[in-house]
Amino acid sequence: MKCPRCSNQTLMNETYEGVTLDRCLSCLGTWLDDGELIEIIETEEKEFGISLTKETLQKSFSGIPESEKQDDLACPKCNKQMRALNYVYSSGVIVDRCPDNHGVWLDVEELEKVQIYKEQWSKKTAERKEELDKVIENIESEHNKKLEQLDEEIASQYLFGSAIKKVLGLFD
């Protein structure tokens, strides 16, 4: 396959976190067949530097730069024009996806940035899980208390109604 960025460079196979991907030795971009990106981001083997992590997180929620929208990259498998997408809609990491779902093209360091973004969100979620569990527990406790109160009100209304009917002689 040829590099969509360099056009004349052949992509070379490389194993990265257990996945065989295709990398351009000229621009260092990466082609991932459909499904390979998910395999890589679920592995979490590679460590990333602080500066790349900060750079990645600062670009979150930044949208797609106009220059990325203007790219005219063709899928190396079907030759159709790929579409620039903001990975998970708000990461600030722009990937190019084949319209026929053959895969994605990531420019230099974008694969690492996708991993950083996913790992940071997973880490934050885990850190907040205990706090969220307490909130859920409190909500459930309050809900159960209200249900018990309603049960008591219904039972007392039923007993009151039954007593009134007995007094009025409606029941034998």
Image (tube, helix red, strand yellow):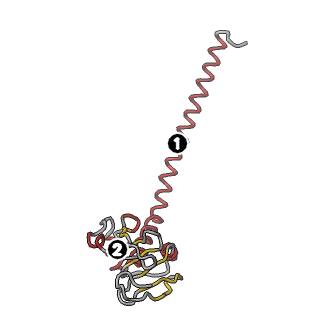
Residue type indicated by callout 2: Thr
User: Quadrant where the N terminus lies?
Assistant: bottom left
Q: Residue at x 54, y 82 (%)?
A: 18
Q: Residue at x 36, y 89 (%)?
A: 26
Question: Would you say 27 lies left or right of 77 here?
Answer: left
Badge 2 is on which residue? 56
User: Quadrant where the C terminus lies?
Assistant: top right
User: For numbered disc 2, what is the local secondary structure?
Assistant: helix
Mark nearer the N terminus (2 vs 1): 2
Badge 1 is on which residue? 143
Please tell me in which quadrant of the rendered image residue 153 appears: top right
Q: Please state which of residues 171 and 7 is positioned toward the viewer in this rendering.
A: 7
Which is more foreground, mark 2 or mark 1? 2
Query: Looking at the image, which residue sits at the far top?
Result: 169
User: For numbered disc 1, what is the local secondary structure?
Assistant: helix
Q: Please state which of residues 75 and 145 is positioned toward the viewer in this rendering.
A: 75
Residue 11 appears at what percent x and percent y?
A: 43, 87
Residue 148 appears at what percent x and percent y?
A: 57, 37
Residue 76 appears at what percent x and percent y?
A: 43, 79
Mark 1 Cα-neighbour bin, 10 Å: few <14, some 14–19, many ≥20: few
Q: Residue at x 59, y 33 (%)?
A: 151
Question: Would you say 170 lies left or right of 98 here?
Answer: right
User: Is 148 rendered above or below residue 45?
Assistant: above
